[in-house]
Every structure is written in structure tokens, then in C-alpha cells.
Amino acid sequence: MTRVRLADLDAALAREGSAGLDRPGYVCIAAGKAAAPMAKAAASVLKTRLRAGLLAAPAAEAFGSFDAVPSGHPVPDAGSERAGRRALDMAASLQRDETLLVLLSGGASALLAVPADGLSLDDKQRATAQLLRAGADIHALNTVRKHLSAIKGGWLASRSGGPVRTFVISDVVGDDVSVIASGPTVPDPSTFAEARQTLDRYGGASAYPAAVVARLDRGARGELPETPKPVCGSLLGPDIMVIGSRRDAMLGATGRALGLGYEVVRIDAPVIGEARVSALAHVRAAVASAQNRQRPLCIVSSGETTVTVTGQGKGGRNQEFALASAELLSHLGAPAALASVGTDGVDGPTDAAGALVDSTTLTRARQEGLQPDRFLSDNNAYAFFSALGDLIHTGPTGTNVGDLQVILLA
């Protein structure tokens, strides 16, 4: 499992020294699942030049100049709001000779939450939960969140009293910096109208809090100021750098497989879409790519799928992806295995990173009296794999660059 190394950010900070990281003072905000290692890397480089820091993460602990605010994910909580308001205050407090250094990683959008005027944290929680249940992808989710927020969509940078420098570990396919963490330091190209249309696409207005719908309606009519756009003065051309992405996880997996003696095929196109549908298409494409290749063969891919929840069970997109792949693997006529995991070590509302299936999964399931289709239709992949002992547990990894899929063919 890929983990954040302090050297990753150390090197990035060193490379960028001539581009602004030579000022006498810094205030640092680190938010996301990799916030702690990123903050420690920044502290090791900046040393006494770091005046103050904020760490917002699910189990954040203070150290050195960094205060910590434990925050909620994937649904924001009271800690998320405290962290968001503290971040805005720190940005506004920036002194003339200081730079605001912002370190973002997967999960930061939920971990820094400041409801816009007229909204409560409960409104945002319910809206986020509904979007997740309805299978909204990260782009759709963040389009709405940015228009319900006083910190996302460039608002944090707009509050800064000085220059802003941002380093990002991307959990978004395509590495769009306006989408990663809902772009608190990046001009926002999305609009209120698009956010309102997103509600219609994922459940309809009646599924969301009335205050959320009312705000987006007012914004779409031009009655509220839009999020900062790329033409807004200091926000033109944000000073931001992506220092990690799903490709790093793929490189790590590829290197490990080569070291174990596998021939490797790397599929660079992202694995996206509805998990149970994408799984079938992906396995078929992977098997096709394996034709005339030497064995044993390892096929590596990455991306981020979604799940539209219609059942009452428990699971995550990686577990559902794996479960949907089981039948195809059983019909290949040769030993095969597939693992799909979240690089953060957490798959949906479970304690597993993902799951493993192989060409024996269906046979073993029948011996236990398990019907895969029934578990899949109930979105209950966790119970299925728990019964077989095929859940993958890594614990939190300290990073998040999306999901990784590995297929082994003998």
C-alpha cells in the first residue's frame, strides 16, 4: 500500500524554493488524510520560519507549531466546522511578509467545512450524505459543496492577507486542482446553476434540505455572489502544485510486481463509473490485454468508481467492484485473482480497504450457502467477503490517491 513519505514533500518544497518558499514567515494549513505527514514535512523544511500551523484530519494530534482539530469524513462534523473557521481566521491573520502554505490531500473537502450564510452544518451533512447515497462522483459532489461553503471554491485564498502556495496529493481522476478538496485556494469554474442541476440529477430537490435548495435557487437567479472565478485578481493563476496522484500508486504496484517476477501490463485509462458495471468491463478489457503475454501476469489499474445505494447492506465501492468481478474470474479457465483497494485503507463506511476475489470465490461461496447476486443487489459486499475471509485490512495509510486494482493471471 502506498504511503506518504516525508521525503516526497521535502523534495517538492526544495524544488520550489526559488518560486516563493524563501520568505521569512509562513502560516501552514494541512487538511486531509495525509495531513499529518505533510505537515511534518513542511515543519522540517521551514523550521523557525513557521509561525503557526493547523492540522485537520480524522484523528489529528497537535505537534510543534501545529494545532490539531480532529474532523469528520466523509460527512463533515462539528470538528470540520471548527477547523474550517480556524483556517479562515489564520488566512486573514497573515502578516505582510508571510506566505500562507496550504497542504491538501484526499478527504480535505469534508474535513474543512464552513457553511455559507443561511445554512447549518446539519444542512451540509444531509446534502453530502444524499449525494453519496445517490452515487454522485467527486466532481458532482464538490460542485454542490463549493456553493454551500464559505471556504471552498477559492474562498480560503480570497481571505488571505498575502500570497498563497498550495501543495496537493490528488485523489481525483484527472488531478483537477479546482476539484481536489473542493479547491479552497483555486478559482472555481462551476456555477450555482450547475450545482442546482446536480441536485436534480441525484435524487431531486425534495431529497435535500430546503435551505440547501433555496440557496442554490437564489444563486442560480443571480441573487448571491458566485464563487471566486479565474478572473478575480489575485486568484488568477493559483500557485499550486500536485505532488502525488493515482499514478504513483500504480508505479509502486508495478515495481513490486516486477520484483516478484511478474510480467506487468499497466492500464493508464482511469477506472470510473458505477462499480458493478465498471468491474465487468474492466475485467473483460484486462483479459483481452493479456492475450499473447507471458505468465504469470500482473495487470495494474487505478481510478475511482461510484456506488448507487439501493440496498440495506454494508460495503464500499472497492468491495462491490470485487464482488461484481467474481463470476467472470470463475469462467476464465485458468487461475486468476483480483484485488480492489482504497489507497487510504478505508473503503466506504467499513474497516476494510477493499476485497480479494479469485477463480475459486464462487465455489467457496456456494459451499458456505452464500448467493453473490443477493449480496450485490443489497449493497452488502462487506458481509459476503467477511464470511469468506477475503476482506483486505490495511488500516489507515496516511494518504489517498484513489483506488488501485490488481489482477493476477497464472
Image (cartoon, rainbow, N blue to C red):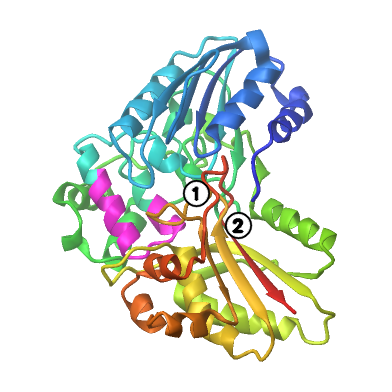
Q: CA distance from mark 2 to mark 1?
A: 10 Å
As drawn, is 119 to the left or to the right of 375?
A: left
Instruction: Where is residue 48? Give x, y as percent.
Output: 64, 8
Disc nearer the start of the sequence (2/1)? 2
- Residue 234 falls in image quadrant: top right
Secondary element type, mark 2: loop
Type of secondary structure dominating the magenta stretch: helix
As drawn, is 268 to the left or to the right of 258?
A: left
Q: Is residue 266 magenta?
A: no
Of residues 80 and 97, the one drawn nearer to the viewer in this rendering: 80
As drawn, is 57 to the left or to the right of 200?
A: right
For the point 40% across and 71% down, the residue is 384
Residue that numbered label 2 is attached to: 174
How many other residues sit within 10 Å of disc 2, few (<14), some (14-19) or many (≥20)? Answer: few
Instruction: Where is residue 175? Give x, y as percent.
Output: 60, 51
Of residues 373 and 220, the one drawn nearer to the viewer in this rendering: 373
Which amino acid, by three-letter code, is at mark 2? Gly
How many other residues sit within 10 Å of disc 1, few (<14), some (14-19) or many (≥20)? Answer: many
Secondary element type, mark 1: loop
Instruction: Where is residue 288? Give x, y as percent.
Output: 70, 86
Q: Which residues are magenta?
A: 124-142
